[in-house]
Image (cartoon, rainbow, N blue to C red):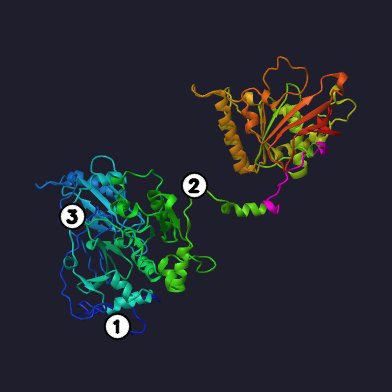
Amino acid sequence: MRLLLLRPLRKLSFLSSSAGLLMGTVQLFKSTPCPNPLSPSSQRHSFHSHRLVFSPLSPKPMSKTRPLCLRTNGYSYVSHANGAAPAELENTEEKRVDFNQLSRLKLKLEMLGIDYGICMPGQYNHLICPICKGGDSEEKSLSVYISEDWGSAFWCCFRGKCGWQGRTTAVGDNKLSRETSNQIAKVKKKREITVESLGLEPLCEELVAYFSERSISTETLRRNAVMQKTTGVQICIAFPYWRDGQLVSCKYRDIEKKFWQEKDTEKIFYGLDDIKGTNDIIIVEGEIDKLAMEEAGFHNCVSVPDGAPPKVSSKDLPPEEQDTKYQYLWNCKEYLKKASRIILATDGDDPGQALAEELARRLGRERCWRVRWPMKNDNEHFKDANEVLMYLGPDVLKEVIENAELYPIRGLFNFANYFDELDAYYYRTLGYEYGVSTGWKGLNELYNIVPGELTIVTGVPNSGKSEWIDALLCNLSESVGWKFALCSMENKVREHARKLLEKHIKKPFFDKRYGGSAERMSAEEFEQGKQWLNDTFYLIRCEDDSLPSISWVLELAQAAVLRHGVRGLVIDPYNELDHQRPPNQTETEYVSQMLTKVKRFAQHHCCHVWFVAHPRQLHQWVGGPPNLYDISGSAHFINKCDNGIVIHRNRDPGAGDLDQVQVCVRKVRNKVAGTIGDAYLTYDRATGQFKDIGIKKST
């Protein structure tokens, strides 16, 4: 028999360097049975020929164009269907081909990228998948079945990172969903298999040397009954799948790391008997990783049979009977239900992490843990358990497993997750930990602006609430350069711009009576002010006749934060928003939910929000500042806010200056940023500025 040299081998080859095998033209694997180094005797075992039948509906192909480890000279394997075709395609009577129908089906296959040119009707054809291109090895992993009358076709790609499935007919639309493909699958009786019926043989010396190169010992191979299968001039590794000592399935691997399994067998974990009755379970992605775990002292480990998905599914979990990709979990649920700790030690690449997430979704994140593989170099981690074993040894692999961390549960954390943020807060590297100064000395001891907080501002009509907020924004722009989004629905744009410019330039906009003897801003100052307005403020305005909702306002504010770096949002006032609510929802419930949305926006975007809310009608008002509980709508305005401020202007000439403004700080949640008390400012009518007058009263 002619011997073929496969290819130069890498460091981790099937060779044992000490054995001196495969030198020059020496073949790696022998076609004849070889002595079993794992057995006391070296007797030869007879080989039972067993044809490998490809099932297009099994998760992995039983046979490929090159099903075993050595290539043959141009041999292309096309399997014929031994079993019945799906119900839709079955017909035992001879069919006459409709050439119009044939043309339509070929056109559809061509549009899908399926090379129908070499396809034969009535049998399974193996092609290169147009979606995944067969991976780096250009594997012919796409199984295509065409009915004998060319009326329909269905296909399935068996690469774990692809899985493209679908069907089409000469007349009608393509159906490419996985569910449609599953519906046409026939329920097949599981095969009963034995070592003899599969023609499995003990490992030869070359394969034992290969495992030795991967730090897998002879004892571990013997304990897991790792075997080989030969056919013709080719040999592959066989991983038998056992349950309660009975052979359930078998998976094969060749030197090019191609995998396939016996068809019509039950899907279970590899190494299932090793986790029977255990409380701690380790799940890995490949059979060799399971063997590596044993070298580190962990027998309570299993491997998934079908590899990893390309990404996490965005769909809800399907019912157990429809969860075909992960059917092995449900077939082994009796082994898993008592486990209190499941360590997911899947590969570190994206598909491996997607597998971990899919397993956690089904097993319950609350009992799952995950491993972090050590760094291989400055840029990448080791990929899996076997790599760690080979390069760092069993002790490091054991340490990695023992240091597994809790699998993250969305919304559930401990403080360790926030230690970096806490350190930055302590050492004041975040910025604005004490809040930003208001620009008024008399108010700074009571109130400072902290990003991510909500301030409710109220006061009786014509008290200067909006004027005070505008003045505050001008101070923040000048001192720290913040930008703001303004949803000010009671102001015309031109009038609001005038008020802001007067406060910024500190001169009246017009040469009119309210300006007194003050000099009007010049045209040059006006032009500079226009540029400042454009750089500092972004307007949120509803151009429709209907009132805007709070969700609409927050959506635009988010865009302003992300696009323009806005740090503050003003919503003025509450009663100008659309407050439609479900018939079964009270106003109090509505206000609570609305303010929760506003607070989440502030916290998530590190943006301070000022929300102006008018008090309800005060029938017995005697001229003093109202209380926060007087706000129209709900007491939640004071309950939900971080800061509550009442702006009050003196209206009694006998009580003092009519331009005196009282800033009543009635709530401060963050004691670092302020405290409850009153500060007094004076209002300059000519420029719209608020100035300190040195009067301060604390409570």
The residue under label 3 is which amino acid type?
Gln
Q: Amino acid at mark 2?
A: Arg
Amino acid type at mark 1: Thr
**Quarter of the rendering containing residue 273:** bottom left
Q: Secondary structure at mark 2?
A: loop
Q: Residue furthest left?
A: 93
Q: Residue at x 58, y 22 (%)?
A: 545
User: Which residue does the image show at 45% across and 64% down from the upper left?
Assistant: 401
Picture coordinates of residue 452 (x, y %)? 65, 41
Element marked by disc 1: loop
- Count of numbered badges drawn on the protein: 3
Q: Which residues are magenta?
A: 425-442
Q: Position of residue 523 (x, y in %)?
A: 82, 34
Q: Earlier in the sequence, mark 1 or mark 2?
A: 1
Q: CA distance from mark 3 to mark 1?
A: 39 Å
Q: CA distance from mark 3 to mark 2?
A: 48 Å
User: Is 213 positioned to the left or the right of 404 in the image?
Assistant: left
For label 2, the crowd category at 10 Å Cα-Cα, with few meaning under 14, some 14 to 19 and many 20 or more, is: few
In this view, 309 is above or below 274: above
Mark 3 or mark 2, which is nearer to you? 2
Position in image of residue 635 (x %, y %): 63, 26
Magenta span contains residue 437: yes
In the picture of the structure, the residue carrying the numbered disc 3 is 123
For this view, does 224 lie left or right of residue 432? left
Q: Which residue is mark 2?
A: 410
Q: Is residue 470 magenta?
A: no
Q: Earlier in the sequence, mark 3 or mark 1?
A: 1
> What residue is pinned by disc 1?
25
* Callout in the foreground (1, 2): 2
User: Which quadrant would the N terminus be assigned to in this image?
Assistant: bottom left
Q: Position of residue 673 (x, y in %)?
A: 73, 42
Looking at the image, residue 554 sits to the left or right of residue 674; the answer is: left
